[in-house]
Image (tube, grey):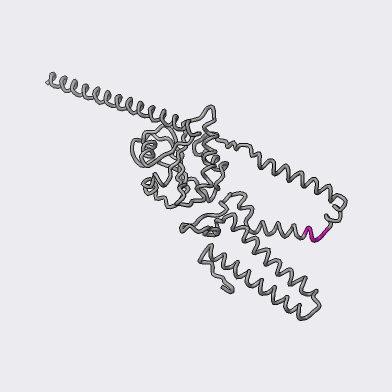
Amino acid sequence: MGRLTTTSLLTWACALVAILLAISVTEANQSADLAIKVAKLNDKASKAKGIIELDSATFEEVLAMPRNYSMVILFTALSPQFQCAPCKNFDPEYKLTAAGWSKLPVKSQLYFGVLDFKVGQSVFQKFNMNSAPSVLYFPATGALSSPPPFDRYDFAKSGFQAEPFASWLSAKAEVQLKVQRPFDFLAFAVKAIGFSGLLALGHILYGRAGKVMRSKYLWAALSLFTIFVMISGHMWNQIRHPPYTMTSRDGRPGFIAAGFQNQFGLETQIVAVMYAVLCGAVISLISSVPRTEDPSKQRLAIWVWLTLFGIMFSILLHFFRLKNPAYPFRLLF
């Protein structure tokens, strides 16, 4: 009985040693494979200013677990047949962020990938993506299975500029990431010429400055311009940086963003013009029409300005219904 027990113990000990050796060999192989994969990623990133081009196969490969590095991946559609204006707008901003990251002397293991719909349709379907661009951040993980966790960048909230995107990524990856834009010589030259022109104009108008500054018409025009710009959503554009226009799915240019929480750059300009026309009609009815001495001309002016006001106000209400079909009000159409 004692001999049998000793034999059993030896058998179990050998089995345990074999299991530990197998685990060690597996971990060593995984470490070697991971080191090779990281070396390949470093090589690809160094050749393209931090950008790693992906397709369906390489996407699965770089996100295979365990993974001791983080990946941020831009899902885009840059092919001409897709006509994705937001994709074209964000692509240089994304590359600018990646280029700044690649220049850092000391950086953690973070890689920037790009997956185009043309070569990654299966991945788009896997993540239920019906639109582009979209950015997902995949943190490092040691798990061997289960779907990889990720965070999605909110374009509607943060915009398409590189600076807010870099701030979001810095918070997620717990790194210090700054955007370094190249010096824009053309913009500097335009500003310098414009400033010189203002100085020259100021010198010419110096003798008349007092009269100009006291003009009620000047200040009224400046006040109205400021009001139209602000109520049309210009400040929202400065904060969120939305696209100027966006091509619709049928290829036609779109300038109205769906919903009251979004808007395009051109859309705010159209709204500002409509408000200006409405205000001009009201001001004319209040100030210009009463000063008209001829009754027939006065009556004609009233009908003209009232008609313009009614048509423009109807267009404004129709504009609101285009943004949200549930908007309940209408006037002429």
Going 54% across and 38% down the picture, which residue do you hit? 97
Left or right of residue 56, residue 208 in this image: right
Which of the 4 quarters of the picture holds residue 329?
A: bottom right
Q: Farthest residue to the left: give it.
A: 1
Seen from the viewer's position, the closer of residues 215 and 107 is 215
Q: Farthest residue to the front: give it.
A: 80
Seen from the viewer's position, the closer of residues 322 and 145 is 322
Main SS of the magenta part reads helix
Q: In which quarter of the image is the C terminus?
A: bottom right
Whether residue 170 is visible: no
State the extent of the magenta-drawn residues as a range: 215-219
When the figure is inspected, residue 293 is found, relative to residue 250, above or below; the finding is: below
Which of the 4 quarters of the picture holds residue 229?
A: bottom right
Going 48% across and 34% down the picture, which residue do you hit? 48
| Percent coordinates x, y for residue 1 in the rendering | 11, 21
Whether residue 132 is visible: yes
| Percent coordinates x, y for residue 297 in the rendering | 76, 78
Left or right of residue 191, residue 72 in this image: left
When the figure is inspected, residue 155 is found, relative to residue 248, above or below; the finding is: above
User: Is-magenta flag for residue 193?
Assistant: no
| Percent coordinates x, y for residue 171 in the rendering | 52, 39
Q: Farthest residue to the right: give it.
A: 207
| Percent coordinates x, y for residue 93 in the rendering | 54, 42
Left or right of residue 304, residue 214 in this image: right
Please state the total of marks drawn on the protein image. 0
Going 80% across and 49% down the picture, which residue do you hit? 201
Going 79% across and 75% down the picture, which residue do you hit? 292
User: Is-magenta flag for residue 218?
Assistant: yes
